[in-house]
Image (cartoon, rainbow, N blue to C red):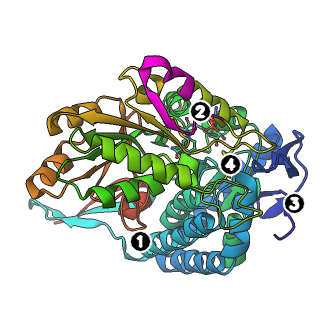
């Protein structure tokens, strides 16, 4: 692996290695080794980033869409060229296998391409006038202004790329604060934009303690928009703060995705897809399929085959062995969270069919775990596990399955498998979620909107919505000057 680069901030066009608020260690979750130390921004450094974004906004917002597209396309090309090295940093910082890191980066490149193209092609609309002196009614999409982008560690390149791509394509400037444990993945992404020619001040990168930084940035009068991906609890706090300052807020929060497997499904295909997708990124994915609701006629077979596939997955340090299927969890707090979920499913409240105990050693390893028939009020069935735990619940009728699926306040992704066309239509229509996958488990592409409802947040990233999210709607009514 390449040497771990020195973590830096990027403020007003300058790379900065010294944080005036000290530094924090970055730890490899597979080995416990300290990779490096990341600078923490002081209030003065945050203010410098805010000023830079504010100063750069008038110029950047007036560049043509074609110019912004050219820069974003160059950034995407550089990201493609550097993908293999950046994927190794992702693995070292948060434990994702190399192939999954590469996949996330290449998807980020396509997202940047799409959002850059939106800058070129997205006009407004003309609305027919009612007569009189009016000549035209024009609706345009104006860049909101400096945006604060707060991102988590589970997709440390792809999630920031959606936010940075949307903001910059729309003509906004940005202050980007990535997760504490993935600073260099973020920095290498920012480097692609800098090397592609993004002017000084347009994109700023700061690091440090998330709570105080978010509070300072959101409260600043410079900030016009806040985009956050992370937990529902933090999203609610930040949303309340943004509302108190009348700032536009876009929360992409947690989920607890149900998967309904009907007796009419192709069971073998459904089990194979579910068992491999569930444990991707060690289950630390907001749209991870998690609550498997399976028709009682096929329940025993589904549990046995799912658990067998889960128990065969190769778990290990993906930095040392690229063939592992699943790496460590991102940090020690996730292990504690998994142990609480399993403990709560003990006794007669569910059966741990495979896994269930942390693997020990220096890294944060927890095995693929399957809980059969967890109680309806168990921690597993009511709280997002955000880890490698699947629960499987039998159902009698398809209406019962939909009722269980829709029973939580989360509403990010939901999935269903059925070979019956009418049933598939019913499921697509009745599952309450921002994104529904039928007979497959992918709900994300560069061209399509990604977002949830209820406790999973609101608004969308990706697709044309990911561009429009960084714009204000403006109406111009144009009348004759006289006579
Ligand atoms: P955590 O809440 O400690 O941190 C999650 C992320 O939120 C981190 O990136 C952190 O920088 C940020 N964060 C934390 N407190 C913040 C604050 N006060 N202001 C601004 N940002 C803040 O939890 P964790 O154990 O690291 O991650 C697991 C939880 O995070 C799960 O519950 C999951 O729902 C959520 N999460 C969600 C997503 C997603 O894609 N929606 C991604 C990662 C984590």
Residue 480 seen anywhere in this rendered image of the structure: no
Query: Which of 90 and 73 lies nearest the eye of the viewer?
Result: 90
Which residue is labeled 2 in the image?
338
Q: Secondary structure at mark 4?
A: loop
Q: Position of residue 80 (x, y in %)?
A: 62, 78
The mark nearer the N terminus, 3 or 4, is: 3
Q: Earlier in the sequence, mark 1 or mark 4?
A: 1
Q: Nearer the viewer, mark 2 or mark 1?
A: 2
Q: In this view of the protein, can residue 352 be seen by the observer?
A: yes
Residue toward you, 119 or 164: 164
Q: Quadrant of the C terminus?
A: bottom left
C-alpha gap between disc 4 and disc 2: 12 Å
Q: Which residue is mark 1?
A: 118
Q: Nearer the viewer, mark 3 or mark 1?
A: 3
Lower sequence index among marks 3 and 1: 3
Which percent across, then down, holds residue 386?
A: 53, 39
Q: Earlier in the sequence, mark 4 or mark 2?
A: 4
* The image quadrant in which ligand 1 is located: top right
């Amino acid at each position: 692996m390449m040497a771990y680069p020195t973590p830096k901030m990027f403020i007003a066009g300058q790379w900065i290695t010294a944080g005036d608020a000290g530094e924090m260690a970055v730890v490899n979750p597979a080995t416990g080794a300290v990779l490096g130390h990341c600078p923490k921004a002081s209030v003065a450094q945050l203010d410098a980033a805010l000023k830079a974004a504010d100063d750069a906004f008038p110029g950047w917002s007036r560049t043509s869409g074609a110019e912004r597209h050219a820069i974003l396309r160059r950034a995407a090309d550089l990201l493609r060229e550097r993908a293999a090295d950046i994927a190794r940093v992702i693995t070292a910082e948060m434990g994702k296998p190399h192939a999954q890191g590469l996949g996330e980066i290449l998807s980020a490149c396509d997202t940047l391409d799409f959002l850059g193209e939106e800058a070129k092609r997205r006009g407004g609309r003309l609305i027919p006038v009612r007569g009189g002196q009016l000549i035209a009614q024009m609706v345009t999409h104006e860049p909101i202004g400096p945006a604060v982008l707060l991102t988590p560690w589970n997709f440390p390149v792809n999630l920031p790329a959606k936010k940075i791509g949307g903001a910059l394509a729309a003509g906004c400037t940005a202050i980007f604060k990535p997760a504490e444990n993935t600073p260099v993945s973020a920095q290498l992404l920012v480097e692609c934009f800098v090397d592609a020619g993004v002017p000084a001040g347009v994109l700023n990168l700061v690091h440090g303690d998330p709570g105080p930084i978010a509070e300072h940035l959101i409260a600043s009068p410079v900030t016009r928009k806040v985009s956050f991906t992370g937990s529902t609890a933090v999203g609610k706090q930040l949303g309340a703060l943004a509302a108190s300052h009348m700032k536009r807020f876009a929360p992409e929060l947690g989920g607890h995705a149900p998967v309904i497997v009907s007796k009419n499904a192709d069971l073998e295909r459904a089990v194979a897809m579910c068992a491999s997708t569930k444990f991707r990124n060690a289950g630390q994915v907001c749209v991870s399929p998690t609550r498997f609701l399976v028709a009682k006629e096929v329940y025993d077979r589904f549990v046995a085959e799912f658990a067998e596939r889960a128990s065969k997955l190769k778990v290990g340090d993906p930095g040392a062995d690229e063939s592992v299927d699943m790496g460590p969890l991102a940090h020690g707090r996730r292990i504690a969270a998994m142990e609480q979920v399993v403990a709560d499913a003990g006794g007669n409240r569910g059966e741990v069919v495979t896994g269930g105990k942390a693997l020990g050693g220096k890294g944060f390893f927890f095995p693929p775990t399957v809980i059969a028939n967890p109680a309806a009020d168990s921690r597993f069935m009511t709280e997002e596990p955000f880890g490698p735990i699947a629960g499987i619940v039998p159902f009698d009728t398809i209406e019962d399955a939909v009722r269980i699926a829709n029973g939580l306040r989360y509403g990010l992704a939901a999935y269903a498998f059925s070979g019956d066309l009418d049933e598939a239509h019913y499921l697509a229509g009745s599952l309450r979620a921002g994104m529904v996958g039928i007979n497959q488990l992918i709900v994300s592409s560069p061209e399509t909107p990604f977002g949830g409802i209820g406790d999973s947040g609101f608004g969308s990233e990706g697709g044309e919505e990911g561009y429009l999210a960084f714009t204000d709607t403006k109406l111009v009514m144009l009348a004759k000057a006289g006579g």
